[in-house]
Image: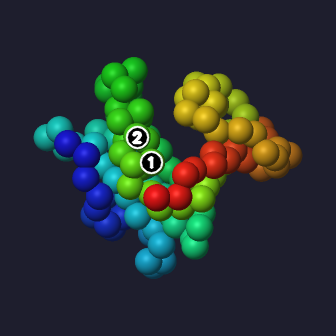
């Protein structure tokens, strides 16, 4: 089941995957989750005017390769009313880069040494405004 939740409702789950996560008081930050008995995947994103940005995406490793990221991503795209969506990905994360390219994202910039051991790749996907 996919549903939208408040970030504070899944804060502990987010921190499990992203220890640097700090709960934002921003009304623009949202989360969608994929639940079975518990949350097994999520996307945290922000909407700023005509643009959305994916902040975090994760799926429990026991459920990876089962299309959950794709289902979450499809749900997000169906419900966004934005001109574009962007994200930043570690240049070493080839699996994630492949997923984003498959879903129509294009590399627009490289941020050298953005991460401790690698570059950050800024990717953007244009959307049809609904």
* Residue 76 locus on image (x, y percent): 41, 49
Q: Secondary structure at mark 1?
A: helix
- Residue that sits furthest to the right in the current view: 112
Q: Nearer the viewer, residue 101 or 15?
A: 101
Q: Quadrant of the N terminus?
A: top left
Residue drawn at 58 percent across, 27 percent down: 102
Q: Please identify the quarter of the rendering in which residue 79 is found.
A: bottom left
Q: Secondary structure at mark 2?
A: helix
Residue placed under numbered mark 2 in the picture = 74
Local packing at callout 1 (Cα closer than 10 Å; few below 14, some 14-19, many 20+) is: some
Give residue 60's mark. none
Side of 103 relative to 107 (left or right): left
Which residue is pictured at 34% across the width and 53% down the height? 32
Circle 2 Cα neighbour tier, 10 Å, few/some/many (<14 / 14–19 / ≥20): few
Q: Which residue is mark 1?
A: 77
Examine the rendering and report whether any part of residue 90 can be seen.
yes
Residue 9 or residue 43, whichever sits in front:
43
Q: Residue furthest top?
A: 65
- Tell me if residue 54 comes above or below residue 66 in the rendering: below
Q: Quadrant of residue 25?
A: bottom left
Specify whether 127 is left or right of 13: right
Provide residue 122's location: percent of width, then percent of height. 73, 47
| Image side of residue 114 versus residue 104, left or right | right
Please tell me which residue lies in front, 22 or 107: 107
**Above or below, 30 relative to 27:** above
Contact between labelled residues 2 and 1, with CB atoms less than 8 Å apart: yes
**Residue 54, percent across and down?**
54, 53
Camera-side residue of 5 and 112:
5
């Amino acid at each position: 089941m996919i549903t939208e939740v408040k970030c504070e409702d899944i804060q502990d789950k987010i921190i499990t995957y992203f220890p640097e996560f700090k709960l934002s008081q921003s009304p623009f930050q949202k989360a969608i989750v994929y639940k079975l008995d518990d949350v097994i995947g999520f996307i945290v994103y922000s909407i700023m005017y005509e643009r959305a940005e994916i902040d975090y995406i994760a799926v429990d490793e026991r459920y990876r390769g089962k299309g959950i990221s794709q289902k979450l991503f499809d749900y997000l795209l169906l419900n966004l009313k934005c001109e574009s969506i962007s994200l930043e990905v570690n240049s070493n994360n080839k699996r994630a880069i492949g997923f984003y390219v498959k879903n129509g994202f294009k590399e627009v910039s490289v941020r050298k040494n953005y991460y401790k051991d690698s570059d950050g790749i800024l990717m953007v996907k244009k959307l049809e405004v609904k």
